[in-house]
Image (tube, grey):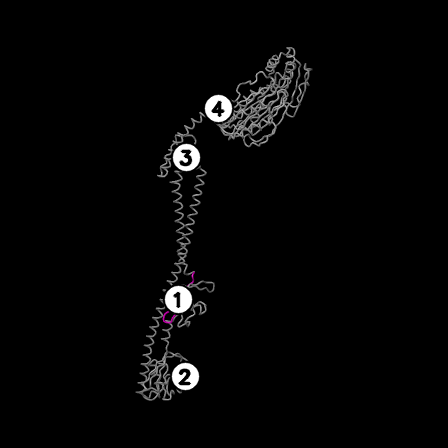
Amino acid sequence: MVICSEKEREDMQRKFLTWLLVLICSAFAVAGLLSFLQFQRQAESRAKALMSNRLYDLMLLIRFTQDNMRHVEQINDRSTLERTRAAARIISQNPAIIKDYELMQGLCNELGATQLCISNEEGTIVAGVPKNVVGFKLGDHEQSRYFLDCINEPGHELVQRPRNSALDGKLLQYAGVTRPDAPGVLQLGFAVQHEQSVREAIGLDTLIEQVMQGASEHVIAFRDGQLLNRGALNLPTSTLLSQPLNSVGEVSTGGVSYATYAIEENGIRLVSFMPWQEISKVSFKSLRYMLLSNMVLFLLMFVIVWWLLRIYVLSGLQRINNGLRRITEGYTEERIEEKSTPEFTRLSTGINAMVDSLQSYADQKREHLMKELHLAAAIQHTVLPSKFPAFPDRTDFDIYASCLQAQTVGGDFYDFFMPDDKHICFLLGDVSGTGIPAALFMMRAISIIRELANTGATPRELVTGTNKILCREGADMKLSLFYGRLNVSTGDLRFVNAGTPQALLCHVSGNYEMLAMHSGAVLGAYSGAAYSECRFHLQPGDRLFLYTQGVINATDSEHTPFGAARLQEALTRETSSVSETIRGIRAALQQFTGNMEQKSDITMLSLEYRGKWTINYHTSFTAGEPAAFEKTLQEKLESVFAAPDSITELQAAVTAILNVFAPDTRVHIQLRCNEQEARLTLTYNQPHFNPLIVLPHLPLDKITFLTSQESSTLKLRKSL
């Protein structure tokens, strides 16, 4: 019982970090998106503020310069008119000036005039500077036509805005007054370079440049719908005029997107254009800075959360896991004292209390279970035949069985009985389950089998009937069963296998091999199960070995199973009686498993068919020690009242044969005899080696030599 294994803890860490990273990245993405949208709005607000401020500054500057320009014009108009009046007074006081060109030129220079025109009552210029103005009629040109009013209205004065001269096309500002000395008009024309330079200095493009101060913003101006400047954008006038007032718009030209803003005042409309890229440059720079700051902040949060998780959660969890692991390994005195946090303190207290309760419950349960196991073992021990030899007065067969009970009593069992003098019935079974229920089910199964066997039922009829009864009784258990019936007079064997029990067959002078058979369904599964009966004829000396899965599933300290190969090897070594065979297997299992407790019962049954022979004896030894076998041979033959001379001859023949072998040759001998004859079978692992070739005639009735690729066999027959 652990909160989580090391792998689960690593998986939990990995999942937590993955989800934490996903959440951090999601939060970073959301924060980045919100920041982007916020900066987009800020960029739009910044564009509106920047362009509106500049446009209003420009509009204020235009209004200011217009006011100043009107003031300058007024001053200039008064100055021009005053000088014109002065010229009229001077000429009226000195009429001779009109007739002297040089005096007129000097007067012009003194007054700062470029032209001087004196006309008569008909509007024809009669004197002036330069000379080519003489003869020009004021009514012939639109510019000079307005001065005719000074002739028609005595005392009339007129100052014109700078206009192109009707005489030479130069830009001049004309002022005219009625002649005080005679009917007519006196005009002075003044050059306007200073005023023109002032106008250029305060022109719209100049003002725009002053306000923009090199910014990438374009401004286009309109007055009463008329375009005042084109700017650097080649856009239709309709597009420029359609931009919304006092709000941010957008246009595109030349692959560049511009933000627009327009204001209008006193008939003057100003439209500003600024590339969105320029507007967003500062905002996106701030956005990049904020995203970088957020990334550092989120990474710091990730590291801090991970550090806190390791310090306050995972380390405490690991210590609790280590404590639980020791508890599950059997150290029930282990106590968990994790108090790094209040939560872990409560968890440790709860676990310790739970372990104490479980320990108390386990002790009670163990005591109850041990009582139940002892009772089940007693039941199982009582039912299984345990007295051997089981049939001491029978020489035509020998049988032996063993059941080593596991710590948890299982349902393995065996049984054998003779329903009559000619047959022996034997069985090996495994009940699915443990404890008293399995023991009781086993007793019921044995009772049914014995009852049906006494009726003379064949193995197939017996197994089929047993299955139907168990299914009808509704037992919640299943039974694997091998049931055999041997006719000890003829060697005829009939058997049925239902489930997992296995059977090995060993012929005389041979090795154990799997007995070919059909396996049907376990008993108690369903009442309609069909079973096949197998038949086999045993020869005198043949042996059967039955076992349950607990034999080959027995494990050592490294949990390695005993396996079928080790079982085969152990069976080959044990060639004496059936009881010695099973004891040898048990010794091999004990040596392999050591003191490891096994989960399943280990149950075996061995049957040897002897037939008519009074003695059927097996043994193995090395050829260099024939004296031991001579003594055994004599004891066995004398037990059937054989004649002494026959015993001596047979001993001499065997000794002579053994002396031909190398001293370390391993020889397996089978002795079968009755009161009339004795038969010896010698098997050794030297193929194609026949010792009779180097021996004289032996005093035997019959000798047969057989060989294979692995061994050779001599069969000896002697009448007693």
Residue designated by label 1: 245
Magenta range is: 260-276
Give the distance between the C-alpha atoms of the residues marked 1 and 2, in whole angstroms: 45 Å
Q: CA distance from mark 4 to mark 2?
A: 147 Å
Q: Is residue 60 left or right of residue 479?
A: left
Quarter in which the C terminus is drawn: top right
Query: Does the segment drawn in magenta span residue 421?
Result: no
Asked if the residues shown at circle 4 and circle 3 are in contact, with their CB atoms under 8 angstroms apart, the answer is no
Label 3, label 2: how many angstroms apart (C-alpha)? Answer: 117 Å
Q: Which residue is mark 3?
A: 322
Q: Which residue is at the front of the view, 526 or 410?
A: 526
Q: Nearer the viewer, mark 3 or mark 1?
A: 1
Q: Taking 162 as reference, is 641 left or right?
A: right
Q: Is residue 60 placed above or below 532 in the rendered structure?
A: below
Q: Is residue 254 left or right of residue 529?
A: left
Reading the chain from its start, which is encountered first: label 3 or label 1? 1
Instruction: Kindly indicate whether the residue at mark 4 contacts the one at mark 1 (C-beta within 8 angstroms).
Output: no
Mark 2: secondary structure? loop
Q: Which residue is mark 4?
A: 377
Which one is earlier in the sequence, the residue at label 4 or at label 2? 2
Query: Contact, CB < 8 Å: mark 1 with mark 2?
Result: no
**Going from the N terminus, do you reach mark 1 or mark 2 first?**
2
Task: Report if the CB atoms under discs 4 and 2 are less than 8 Å apart.
Answer: no
Q: Which mark is residue 141?
A: 2
CA distance for labels 1 and 4: 105 Å
Q: Give, as a three-letter code, the residue at label 1.
A: Leu
Q: Quick one: SS at disc 4?
A: helix
Residue 223's label in the rendered image is none
Residue 436 vs residue 296, the one in the foreground: 436
Q: Tell me which numbered mark, 4 or 3, is placed earlier along the sequence.
A: 3
Query: What x and y, as percent, mark residue 387?
Result: 53, 18
